[in-house]
Image (cartoon, rainbow, N blue to C red):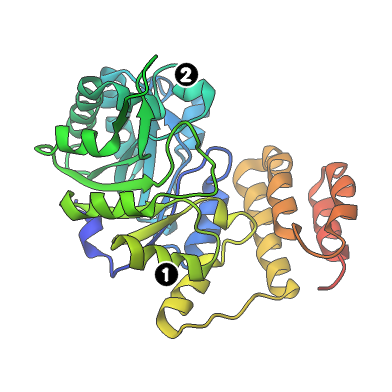
Amino acid sequence: MANFWQQFNKPILALAPMCGVTDLPFRLICKELGADLVYTEMTMVQSLSRQNPAALRLAQLDPSEQPVIIQLGGREPEHFRAAAKIARQLGAAGIDINMGCPAKKIAGNGSGVSLLRDLELARQIIEATLEGAGDLPVSIKTRTTIKLPGQDQTQSSQDLLRFVADLPIAAVMIHGRNFEAPWSETVNYDYIREVKNFFPGIVLANGGIYEPEIAKQVLDQTGADGVGIGHGVYGRPWIFEEIRDYLATGHYTPKDWNYKLQVALKHLHLSQKIKGDLGLPEFKKQLLWYIKGLPGAASYRDKMAQINTLSDFEQALRDFPNQ
């Protein structure tokens, strides 16, 4: 399979992987609304390598979302090797290794961003993933730095990338915040530029990109090949179209409520079609994101927490005050 990373027009607009967010229905919506590339939710390698049904559901793909990357998380090289083979069989265009998640249940067990503390283990994981991936490109998502245990000294993702410089890593998505302040207002975009200056593969900038104007500023400041949109896509999957328009013309047209309503209804129906009844309660947080910040949204929050059926969701959305 050809390395799809080299086939994009730049800048690349990617939907960043997010647990509980980038499921198949949402990825299909984002792809339709301008995302060049989408990532699955993180799937833990120990579960996927055993073909656990829940892990297979997280890694469920659809041909219309290609190219799609399955993101893997964990800390056991042998499980990464086995999971990468399964990801290839499932039809992934590429495989991403999570070395950036700061969540306590992930980083606390030595996975995610904690892998930056153990460069030798991180290298073994990358090597094992490359072996299992075969001809699929392998990428990494990571952060800036993490403190070493009991020390003020930090280890960085630049340290990692230099340590594995001889390995064929196709791309890296850098979240410009560190482990100790994972959601601070300040994002270190200069750090991402430093990575771009020496890393030979594709570099995607990630973190704090909530508006098209910010996306352009980040691209200009970092020199990155593209951006990975995370929280900026909450309730706004059309942000990819807006960024593309703004980069091309310096303008974009904000979406009215009727447009947002049609997207939300399509997302709702996809969730129910793909996930069945399980998709409806999972859609609630997405629904609240669609109306967040709109007049009347606060009064609707309690109402929406009580609804459970497809018709209830449809009616609640259509009853929302016309914006």
- Give the residue at x 40% y 49%: 188
Labelled pair 2, 1 in contact (Cβ < 8 Å): no
Place residue 282 in its image quadrant. Answer: top right
Q: Which residue is mark 1?
A: 216
Q: Which residue is mark 2?
A: 108
Amino acid type at mark 1: Lys
Amino acid type at mark 2: Gly
The label number, if any, that marks residue 21 in the structure image? none
Side of 85 where 27 appears, left or right: right
Side of 184 where 247 appears, left or right: left
Q: Can residue 61 be seen here?
A: yes
Q: Can residue 33 be seen here?
A: no
Side of 178 where 138 appears, left or right: left
- Give the residue at x 16% y 50%: 198
Disc 1 is placed on an element classified as helix
- Give the residue at x 50% y 54%: 208
Q: Residues within 10 Å of mark 2 (few under 14, many from 20)?
A: few
Disc 2 is placed on an element classified as loop
Q: How many marks?
A: 2
Q: Is residue 36 above or below residue 106?
A: below
Q: Nearer the viewer, residue 205 or 316?
A: 205
- Give the residue at x 33% y 45%: 92
Q: Residues within 10 Å of mark 1 (few under 14, many from 20)?
A: many
Q: Position of residue 307 (x, y in %)?
A: 85, 45
Place residue 277 in its image quadrant. Answer: top right
